[in-house]
Image (cartoon, grey):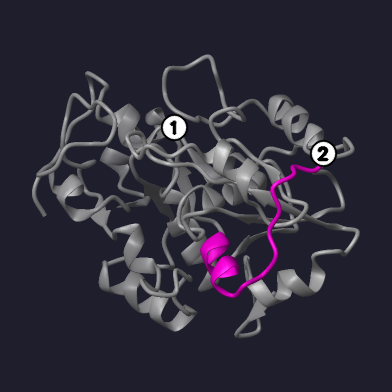
Amino acid sequence: MTKNAKPSALVSTQWLADHLSAPDVRVVDATSFLPGSGRDAAAEYRECHIPGAVFFDIDDIADHSTDLPHMLPAPEVFSSKVRKLGLGDGNTIVLYDANGGGMAAARAWWMFRVFGARSVFVLDGGLPKWQREGRPTEDIPPVPSPRHFTSRMNSTLVRSLKDMMANLDSRREQVVDVRAAPRYRGDADEPRPSAKKGHIPGAANLPWADLYDPEAGTLLPPDRLRARLEAAGIDLARPLVASCGTGVTACTLALAAHEVGKVDVAVYDGSWAEWGNHPDTPVDQGE
């Protein structure tokens, strides 16, 4: 679980294969698909998952008092939900998704960190890499034994609309939008309804897909990640907030930054689903 002598948030498929039966290791499928994809993450999980994996639904383990998609739930709600999945104190939690790790697995990793988990990792390359290597899968969901999870919310990893509005004036924190460039510029429609197009004023753009090897589906190595971050104008010595469409792929930037030693990247939970529909938010377009 280490890379370049620094703590890594990634585990390899070989590591997971070697530790799949370890009593403290829990495997979690956190797959989620964009609206309009025609794919059902829960159904695909039931048909094929890594042996022993439970299903973490980011739309269920969420705040249902808001219309915004999959917002962070209250700590006690998170504890209750993951307890029923058999995920608790003392577990080493390995998260994956059918997108290779660049989507909801990173979101779930960030959520567990927000609520105090210390031994939580993302499977590099996710289910696609696992399957390409001919490793085992199963179609029978496990019946987990409930396990106590102690939530200790780390609010330093979360930003609200109020925080983001205040930052427009202070510019204390760098904001990086990881949506594809056409959406950032305001040239393309959002997957979900949005009253506005463009980006938060002052935000830089580093599309999340640029952080991954397009063929292997794995996160780029630390030296290449650092180069991508620096090329986007990101100063790793300064506070950094990630934003995206709904707070999911923003977490890939937090994961990538973690791999180069910056472990305190915050995520704007509401992201464009909130900013792009709020009457009082200013918007920039273009580069």
What's the mark number on residue 244? none
Q: Which residues are magenta?
A: 125-143
* Quadrant hosting residue 258: bottom right
* Residue marked by disc 2: 149
Q: Residues within 10 Å of mark 2 (few under 14, many from 20)?
A: many
Q: Is residue 68 left or right of residue 46?
A: left
Q: What residue is rendered at 53% in x and 30% in y?
A: 59
Residue 236 or residue 179, whichever sits in front: 179
- Say if the magenta span includes residue 16: no
Task: Check the image and report above or below for 280 versus 14.
Answer: above
Quadrant housing the N terminus: bottom right
Q: Residue at x 49, y 57 (%)?
A: 254
For badge 1, the amino acid type reads: Ser
Residue 45, horizontal then vertical, whole percent: 61, 44
Badge 1 local density, few (<14 within 10 Å), some, or many (20+)?
Answer: some
Q: With 198 as the anchor, is 40 left or right in this view? A: right
Quarter residue 142 falls in: top right
Q: Is residue 260 above or below residue 266?
A: below
Asked whether residue 262 appears in the rendered view, the answer is: no
Give the number of the disc on residue 160: 1
Where's residue 82, x and y in %?
A: 74, 36
Residue drawn at point x = 70 percent, y = 25 percent: 77
Main SS category, magenta section = loop
State the quadrant of the C terminus.
bottom left
Q: Which secondary structure lies at badge 1?
A: loop
In the image, residue 228 sits, relative to residue 172, either above or below, namely below
